[in-house]
Image (tube, rainbow, N blue to C red):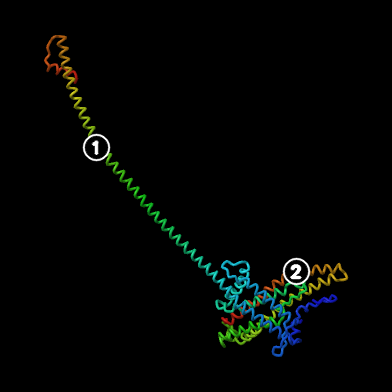
Amino acid sequence: MAAESGKIDPMHQFEVTPLGGGFNLGGHEVFFTNSALWMVIAAVVLGLFMWGGMRRQLIPGRWQVAVESFTGFISNMMTANIGTEGRKYTPYVFSLFMFILFCNLLGMLPLGVLGVHPFTVTSHIAITGVLALLSFSIVLVVGFWRHGLHFFSLFVPHGTPLPMIPFIAVIEFISFMIRPFSLGLRLFVAMTAGHVLLKVLSGFVINGFNADNLMIGSVVSVLSFTLMIGISALELLVAGIQAYVFALLTSLYINDAVNLH
Amino acid sequence: MPQIAQLTADNWYLASQLFWLLVVFAGIYVVIGRGMLPKIEATVDARDRKVADDLAAAKAAHAAADNLEESYRQQSEASRAAAQKAVADAKDKAAKDAEKRLAKVDAELGDKLAAAETEVAAARKSAMAEIESVAAEAASDLVAKLSGAKVAAADAKAAVKAVLHG
């Protein structure tokens, strides 16, 4: 939030800045950045959350129920979408879901009040794109490993009339190849848009109170602040939904690879 | 948009992002996905199995209790029927016994009555005869006293008989 002389840059929050620890990796300088810091924070918070649910009691406490409801949510999704074989991929999808969810939620924390600027790791296409490519490569590896070249029958849906096969196959192939982009782009865009909107509105709040005409400025500020409360709630929802959508689509794509059509 | 600007502008950006993402995500996958998740799932599975087992046990116990109740009911019904039969038999037997005894007593009483009647008849007969003889004597005495005539005992008797029997 760069509020110098009333000018607010809603994009500044997405800037990755090195915090130190630079070393060379194959000709590229690698720094420990604010993005990496928040990934580590997400991992640590996630680890603490999971650790609290590891008491393994027959009659679970509240925390254990919370953790088990997350694991149960993902493993039910996997068995519902893929079948009993889906449990093999639960660790990956669960890690994915929890990592994205915690990154999304931690980025929403109002720590700016304390002078700390939370960074939303999932608002970077470099991150979401890599995660999407990871899911996509798993689909490819599993598909070719299990079905060999028969995996290409994925592009010909069951019951396609013979003359339609070339067209359908091309369309299916394109829609298949677009998957990693749509998967990564969806999360990146949702996170970026939400944070930009919140930042713009918070800029309105500040500029409103700093305005020459305090009367109109206050009205703008109060209205913007009210709107921000609602949009913050919406963004919390979006944080959960986007993590869910990412995990759900990954499980559906893995299902294609495991069971074909 | 720094997300895209930094991709091309900063040499370190992509490498740092990728490196730390892979390190952190691999850590999460290994420690949480492979280490913690299976344990939690095992706990949940064990609980589900325990609940299912307990439910099955409860169902079996319920069925056993039902069977027990059914057999108990049948048993009690049978014993009730047996008891009722025994009571009916006893009643029947008692009634027959009473009838037999009553008949016997009846016959005895009849005999006694008949004997008493004959005795009474005999007594009346002898009493009658005595009365006749006493009356004849009295009559002959009266006649002797009144007229001084001696009446033969046989005549007196005949006269008295005629009077007594009309």
Q: Residues within 10 Å of mark 2 (few under 14, many from 20)?
A: few
The residue beneath circle 1 is: B107
* Residue that extends furthest to the bottom in the rendered view of this protein: A27
Q: Is residue A239 above or below residue B148?
A: below
Q: SS class of the residue under badge 2?
A: helix
Subunit under mark 1:
B
Q: Is residue B82 above or below residue A19?
A: above
Depth check, mark 1 against mark 2: the one in front is: 2
* Residue that extends furthest to the top in the rendered view of this protein: B147
Q: Position of residue B130 (x, y in %)?
A: 17, 21
Q: SS class of the residue under badge 1?
A: helix
In the foreground, A221 or B146: A221
Q: What residue is shown at x 70% (from left), y 88% (from top)?
A: A25
The circle on residue A169 is none
Distance from label 1 to label 2 (Cα)? Answer: 117 Å
Please indicate, yes or no, whether residue A14 appears anywhere in the rendered image.
yes
Q: Position of residue B6 (x, y in %)?
A: 75, 84
Within the image, what quadrant is residue A219 found in? bottom right
Subunit under mark 2:
A
Q: Position of residue B118 (x, y in %)?
A: 20, 30
Q: Residues within 10 Å of mark 1 (few under 14, many from 20)?
A: few
Q: CB under 8 Å between callouts 1 and 2?
A: no
Q: What residue is shown at x 83% (from left), y 68% (from top)?
A: A218
Q: Position of residue B160 (x, y in %)?
A: 17, 17
Q: Amino acid at mark 1?
A: Ala
Q: Amino acid at mark 2?
A: Ile
Q: How many marks?
A: 2
Left/right of residue B89 with respect to residue A8 in the rendered view: left
Instruction: Specify whether disc 1 shares its chain with disc 2.
Output: no
The residue beneath circle 2 is: A229
Left/right of residue A216 with respect to residue A178 in the rendered view: right
Please indicate, yes or no, whether residue A93 appears anywhere in the rendered image.
no
